[in-house]
Image: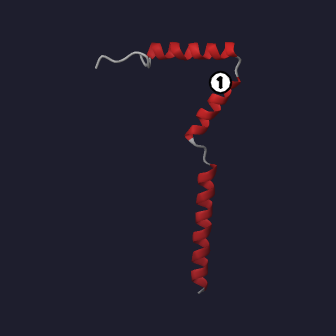
Amino acid sequence: MTLAVVVVLIVVLVGAVAFLAMRRRPRQDDGLRSFRRHIDALSPEARREVQDRARRHDQGSGNDPGVKGTD
C-alpha cells in the first residue's frame, strides 16, 4: 500500500514538473509578437526606414514576394 502511494506521488510530481516546464518555455510566436510590438511602437518615419531596409534585403536575396518565379 505504501509503495503504491509513493509511486502515485512520484507520477503526480513528475507530471506537475513537466506541465510547469512546458508552460514556461517561450514559444516561437513570442519573438514575432515582440518584434511586431516594437515595430508598432516606432514613429512612422522610423517604421518606413525599417520597412525600406527589409525590402532592400528581400530584393538582394531574391526573395521578393511580388515577383513570380520562372519555374
* Amino acid type, mark 1: Ile
The answer to which quarter of the image holds residue 40 is: top right
Residue 33, percent across and down?
A: 62, 34
Image coords of residue 14 (percent x, y): 59, 65
- Quadrant in which the C terminus is drawn: top left
Which scheme is used to colour this image of the protein? secondary structure
Does 70 sit above or below residue 22? above
Please tell me in which quadrant of the rendered image residue 19 appears. Answer: bottom right
Look at the numbered disc 1 and give the secondary structure of its residue: helix
- Quadrant for the N terminus in the image: bottom right
Residue at the image point whose x is 44% and y is 20% from the top: 65
Seen at 60% across and 69% down, the residue is 12
Q: Is residue 68 above or below residue 31?
A: above
Q: How many marks?
A: 1
Residue 69 against residue 19 in the figure, above or below: above
Q: Give the camera-side residue of 70 and 14.
A: 70
The structure residue drawn at horizontal position 61% and vertical position 38%, both measured from the top left corner, is: 30
Label 1, residues with CA under 10 Å away: few <14, some 14-19, many ≥20: some
- Dividing the picture into quadrants, the one containing residue 16 is bottom right
Q: Residue at x 59, y 53 (%)?
A: 22
**Which residue is at the front of the view, 33 or 2?**
33
Spot the residue most to the left.
Answer: 71
Q: Position of residue 68 (x, y in %)?
A: 36, 17
x, y (%) of residue 53?
A: 57, 14
Disc 1 target residue = 39
